[in-house]
Amino acid sequence: MLTPLLAALLLLQQPSFRTIAIDERLAADARLAVGDTLLVSAQPGGSGDTVIVSAIVKRGADPADIARSEYQVRLHLDHLQKLAGYGDRVDRFAVATRGPEATERALSDINSAAFGFEAHRSRDIAVGTSRTFQVVSRFHKAIGVITIVASAIFLLCIMLLKVEERRRDVAALRLMGISRRTVVTAIVTEAALLALVGSALGVGVGFLSARFINWYYQGVYRTPLLFSIITPDIVTLAVILSLVLGIGAGLLASLRLVRTPPLTLFGR
């Protein structure tokens, strides 16, 4: 049995290794766990340092990481400088500021400090690195506009056919003394109710589709990034657009029908 003094001496004699943190994708692919010993080097197969995995970091929801599909390893700054042989130099670093005025002063001071320094706002860098996603977003908006226009034309045709099928019922109501306004109100109300039911079903399908898309692509790319989002603004826009198109189609179809004489609707 080891005495406390002997155990302490043995711990002092053991080599002390630096610690690193790796991302969860690297840990899963290489089957690594906290406490494993690794050899890191600047060049493949070259001499390096023995390190111990001290943490496994969860990947952030960054769209830029999906395109690169790279593994991430985090080291202490002095350890990274020694390993890379880069000296006291950095390619870029981030500075947190307090408010827009402090940001403007920091930009001015850094850019005027010396030749070769160039400071940018983080949002400007984000915009510059996400141009591909902006193109995809515009493409989706174009598809959405085309879909809305096509669906509006299709909805109007369906409403015209449905109302045309009820021409004898409308003619009977007109001959019974029911006013045109009442007939139009009834048809528009029915179209509005159908639009509400359709928008509710559409929102439900959208939520299920978004959950499936996120589940599938998050598993493929192993990222917490959300690929499909259903926000309250989107739901509100969809419901309002559905109501406007439904009421508009019902109004046009009903006006076309009530302006026709009742006997003509009967085919006489």
Image: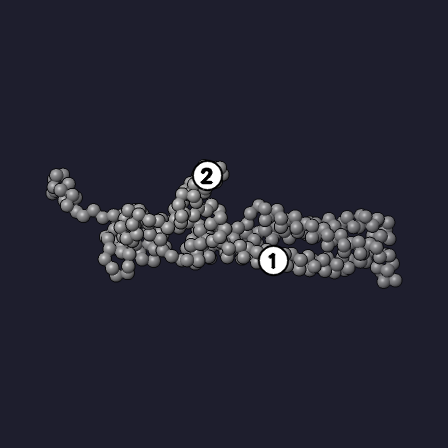
Determine the residue positioned at 33% across, 52% down.
73
Q: Secondary structure at mark 1?
A: helix
Determine the residue positioned at 84% across, 59% down.
265
Determine the residue positioned at 76% across, 49% down.
186
Relative horizontal placement of residue 171, taking residue 224 as reference (left or right)? right
Relative horizontal placement of residue 136, taking residue 82 as reference (left or right)? right
Q: Which residue is mark 1?
A: 142
Say whether residue 170 is visible.
Answer: no
Residue 105, numbered label: 2
Nearer the observer, disc 2 or disc 1? 2
User: Which quadrant holds residue 141?
Assistant: bottom right
Say whether residue 18 is visible.
Answer: yes
Q: As displayed, is residue 198 above or below residue 112?
A: below
Place of residue 175 in the rendered image (x, y in percent of width and height, measured from the top left): 86, 53
Towards the viewer: 134 or 230: 134
Contact? badges 2 and 1 (CB < 8 Å): no
User: Which quadrant holds residue 253?
Assistant: bottom right
Q: Secondary structure at mark 2?
A: helix
Towards the viewer: 153 or 169: 153
Place of residue 105 in the rendered image (x, y in percent of width and height, measured from the top left): 46, 39
Give the class, few, some or many, for how many residues have Cα within 10 Å of label 1's Cα (few <14, many ≥20): few
Towards the viewer: 29 or 136: 136
Determine the residue positioned at 77% across, 59% down.
164
Cα separation, mark 2 vs mark 1, equals 40 Å
Relative horizontal placement of residue 215, taking residue 8 as reference (left or right)? right
- On-image quarter of the N terminus: top left
- Residue type, numbered disc 1: Ala
- On-image quarter of the C terminus: bottom right
Towards the viewer: 234 or 202: 234
- Residue type, numbered disc 2: Arg
Place of residue 91 in the rendered image (x, y in percent of width and height, measured from the top left): 37, 50
Place of residue 92 in the rendered image (x, y in percent of width and height, measured from the top left): 39, 49
